[in-house]
Image (cartoon, helix red, strand yellow):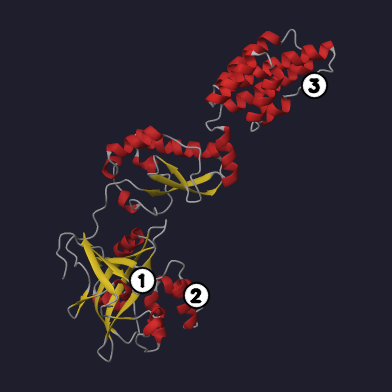
Amino acid sequence: MLDAQKKSLELFQDKQFGAANVYLERTYTECPKLSEAFYYKGDNRTSEQKREDDIHIQFMHDLMRTRLYAEKYEGCLEIGEMLFDRSTKRVPRKTLDAMKSILATCRQRASRNCSDNAIKKGLFWEVDPETLYLFTQSIVDAFEKRDMAAFRSHIKGDLGNGPRNRYLDGKKLSDIFDEDFRDTVLEYGATCYVHSWRGIAMSNSSIWIQWSSPKTFTISGVWESFPEKFYRDDMPTGWTVNGKLLTPDRFSRPDMANENYSSLAKKLSLKDSEAIATTPGKFLTAMKGQTVIAGEYENLSLLRRATANPEHKEKRRSNGVIHFESNAEEYPIRSSYQILADIPTEFCQSLALNFSGKCIQSYLVETGDETGGSMGTIVNIGIYGLFEMPDKSKVIAPLIHFTTDTAARNYLEDNNLAPDLSKKANN
């Protein structure tokens, strides 16, 4: 921007009006009316045409040079109206009409909140930047006024990350966010820009927004909030069966692209691969009494032996999470799991009706698989049951998989399974 200002000023001082306008017009081609109104006829002009063009060029030059200093065109509009008032008595009608057209564009641009670049990027992402600006500004206004109702009006359903919508009932903004976060929202303000295919980021990427149409937006994630106290702190660290700590591979779960469950659905002649990935407990009877498939095909079974896999070595423990590493592949596989909540065995059994095994223990478990890439750790949360089979062998079976921790918490509440924080866990 400073280089453009310097270049424009040098051209202006040299009275190279035509060259200056060509430079400025090329710099701001996003402004269609200004480009459309610009013209330069060269040396073969009549004296009247020369007079007309000199007026027009001077006007264009001053107008567009001023644009360099005014992001929202206020300066452009101010100098344009001043020049227009001075010129009305001596400017030919055709040039006057061109000047009016330019001023109309300036007035339109002066009312905008977003730059030409934001408008151009908005076209690429099929987002209306002005509507986005107003949406994000209203979020800023909600924080400025400490208005929880206004903030919640920007959320549809539950967030992918952040406080649960139902948890916000009866809360004040200060119950969820601290003053530092509020200051950050106010400092960064509204935005006109789409961050990437991941969404729209505002407030230093602490609030994320998605769009369903060019003018329809919703908050999708909030990364700074006071945590909701939901799970008990005294849950067991790791799941132990017959004195042996289960390893993460004992918990069957969808992989990154759900290929393993899709293959399993095909193997069981199931048409709905999504159903088995969300409510696998309903399909345990489809195993037709078979126990665990051994060897390399074990990942194509819902059932896993309730034993430790010696290939997975425990590396460390942190806040109830146990981290493991396996060197069985070409590169180390790092995974982890944590027990979040105790599930009554009778409820566990109800999720596996007609299954030949008897549920003797059940937990809500969060597993994590490191990708080694930009996606970070893939997290799965599910209810698992320890079943004793008719032959007295024990297996671990998945019963329900949740897409988010929020979905898991809502499910527990809806089924009267939410942990009672006043009681101790049944270890």
Please report the residue visible at 26 percent of the width from the left and 87 percent of the height from the top.
393
The span from disc 2 to disc 1 (Cα, nearest Å) is 15 Å
**Helix, strand or loop at mark 1:** strand
> Is 416 located above or below residue 55 in the figure?
below
What's the mark number on residue 400?
1
Question: Could you tell which of marks 2 and 1 lies nearer the N-terminus?
Answer: 2
174 sits to left or right of 253:
left
Determine if residue 44 is in view: yes
Please report the residue visible at 66 percent of the width from the left and 24 percent of the height from the top.
104
What's the mark number on residue 272?
2
Locate residue 388, reporting x and y percent.
26, 85
117 sits to left or right of 352:
right
What's the mark number on residue 41?
3
Tag 2 and tag 1, C-beta contact below 8 Å: no
Could you say which quadrant of the image residue 8 lies in?
top right
At label 2, the amino acid type is: Asp
At label 3, the amino acid type is: Lys
Q: Residues within 10 Å of mark 3 (few under 14, many from 20)?
A: few
Question: Could you tell which of marks 3 and 1 lies nearer the N-terminus?
Answer: 3
The span from disc 2 to disc 3 (Cα, nearest Å) is 69 Å
Q: Residues within 10 Å of mark 2 (few under 14, many from 20)?
A: few
For marks 2 and 3, give the one nearer the viewer.
3
